[in-house]
Image: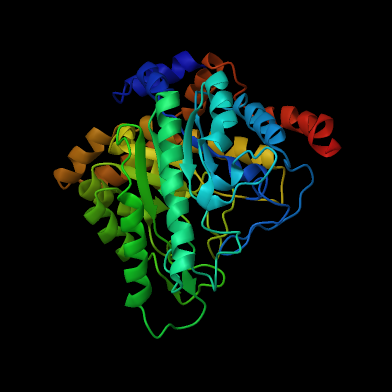
């Protein structure tokens, strides 16, 4: 089937594919830099630790800022549209001497901003509350030692300043996401104490004045993790109430809930509570293992909610780190999968389906929900890619394999 034929078929159910192609091109997804080097950063030779774990040792990972930038640039050429890049604080570019995290500043991120300007990327940012000697007994902002808490408070404050710089320089709001690994492996005797300390530390960070037009702070929850199986300070409930009190956004991560929970079902409640939804797209397998996202039911359901409630109301970023496969391929596959599911959702007549639901016509609703799944979305995807100068089919993998042979495997 040609695009013109697909266009006519979709028109019969009230879908304007030209508008869909235009609207999909407006959705900028924030691509996570840490897929390129296994969440290592440029502070030391150590790997990810203290609440972060990467599995696999595939050859060719980036070990310098220039390599990481080059890998991101190459990946972006295989992804249709114009997107953003999400940085962690541990990716600061240090010259003669490594600046510790409580002293990080604009200077360490000027090269990233210059690179983003050159390539037309927006930047998003994250304080790095892990992989550091000051993560003591798994705690950062909730640590009982006031000196440890102050170190991380100062880090958070500096990161707000860096995010403000990024947002102003690039004339695009910088989302800064706060996530801490704090928690306990076994049952705690005191659950409220660490949360009081966490709230007090965050209060001190957010007392810092920042330009709210340039910075969008978000706060991320987690159910459990390796080493913190029994208790996380920043549980879903704690994060929700704190974000509402502080008037910032709570962030949903698809990998941070029980596997039987539907993250898609939470989205509408978040939108009602906050007016905007910050979202990390990931794929847990058994645990928050950050696998590359696939076009599965979970991703499809989330993409549908984003489309139904308006993509302009969402901040969408990817968050996984698979070191068992080619890291560049992992970026390209994940970004394209997200776009494909958004496209399929945009090619569905939700208004008509909602009308059937409201009228109690559940038989017709179910039948049409299923039939529309088989409409020719691939032809629209091919046209979208063509207009963006990107290959639509799996032949992009050949380009990655050549890059791997010529660049990655020579590192």
Q: Residue 262: x percent and y percent?
A: 38, 57
Q: Which quarter of the figure is the C terminus placed in?
A: top right
Q: Position of residue 62 (x, y in %)?
A: 72, 40
Residue 174 or residue 381, whichever sits in front = 174
Q: Residue at x 68, y 37 (%)?
A: 95
Q: Where is residue 12, by image quadrant?
A: top left
Residue 259 location (% of width, % of height): 46, 64
* Quarter of the image where one finds residue 204: bottom left
For residue 178, say whether it is visible. no
Residue occupying image coordinates x 22% and y 40%: 354
Does residue 186 appear anywhere in the picture? yes
| Front residue of 132 and 250 | 132
Query: Which sits in the foreground, 327 or 182?
Result: 182
Query: Horizontal placement of 174 versus 285: left or right?
Result: left
Picture layout, residue 40 above or below residue 215: below
In percent of width and height, residue 327 lies at 68, 42
Q: Residue at x 83, y 33 (%)?
A: 405
């Amino acid at each position: 089937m040609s695009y013109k034929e697909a266009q006519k078929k979709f028109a019969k159910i009230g879908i304007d594919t030209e508008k869909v192609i235009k609207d999909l091109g407006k959705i900028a997804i924030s691509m996570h830099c840490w897929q390129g080097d296994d969440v290592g950063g440029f502070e030391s030779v150590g790997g990810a630790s203290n609440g972060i774990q990467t599995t696999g040792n595939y050859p060719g990972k980036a070990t310098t800022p220039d390599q990481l930038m080059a890998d991101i640039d190459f990946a972006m050429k295989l992804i249709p549209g114009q997107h953003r890049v999400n940085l962690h604080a541990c990716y600061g570019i240090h010259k003669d001497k490594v600046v510790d995290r409580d002293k990080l500043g604009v200077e360490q991120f000027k090269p990233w901003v210059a690179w983003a300007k050159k390539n037309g990327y927006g930047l998003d940012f994250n304080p790095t509350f892990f992989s550091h000697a000051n993560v003591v007994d798994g705690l950062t902002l909730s640590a009982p030692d006031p000196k440890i808490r102050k170190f991380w408070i100062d880090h958070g404050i500096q990161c707000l300043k860096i995010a403000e710089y990024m947002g102003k320089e690039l004339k695009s709001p910088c989302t800064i996401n706060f996530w801490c690994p704090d928690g306990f492996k076994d049952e705690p005797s005191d659950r409220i104490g660490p949360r009081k300390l966490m709230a007090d530390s965050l209060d001190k960070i957010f007392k810092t004045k920042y330009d709210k037009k340039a910075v969008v702070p978000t706060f991320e929850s987690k159910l459990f993790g390796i080493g913190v199986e029994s208790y996380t300070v920043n549980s879903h409930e704690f994060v929700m109430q704190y974000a509402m009190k502080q008037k910032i956004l709570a962030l949903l991560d698809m990998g941070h809930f029980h596997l039987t929970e539907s993250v898609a079902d939470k989205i509408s409640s978040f939108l009602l509570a906050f007016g905007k939804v910050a979202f990390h797209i990931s794929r847990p397998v058994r645990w928050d293992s950050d696998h590359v996202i696939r076009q599965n039911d979970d991703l499809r359901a989330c993409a549908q909610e984003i489309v139904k409630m308006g993509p302009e109301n969402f901040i969408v970023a990817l968050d996984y780190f698979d070191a068992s496969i080619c890291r560049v391929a992992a970026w390209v596959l994940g970004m394209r999968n997200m776009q494909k599911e958004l496209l399929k959702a945009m090619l569905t007549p939700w208004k008509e389906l909602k009308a059937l639901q409201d009228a109690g016509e559940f038989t017709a609703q179910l039948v049409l929900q299923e039939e529309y799944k088989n409409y020719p979305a691939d032809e629209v995807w091919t046209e979208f890619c063509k207009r963006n100068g990107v290959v639509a089919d799996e032949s992009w993998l050949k380009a990655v394999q050549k890059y791997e042979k010529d660049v990655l495997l020579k590192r």
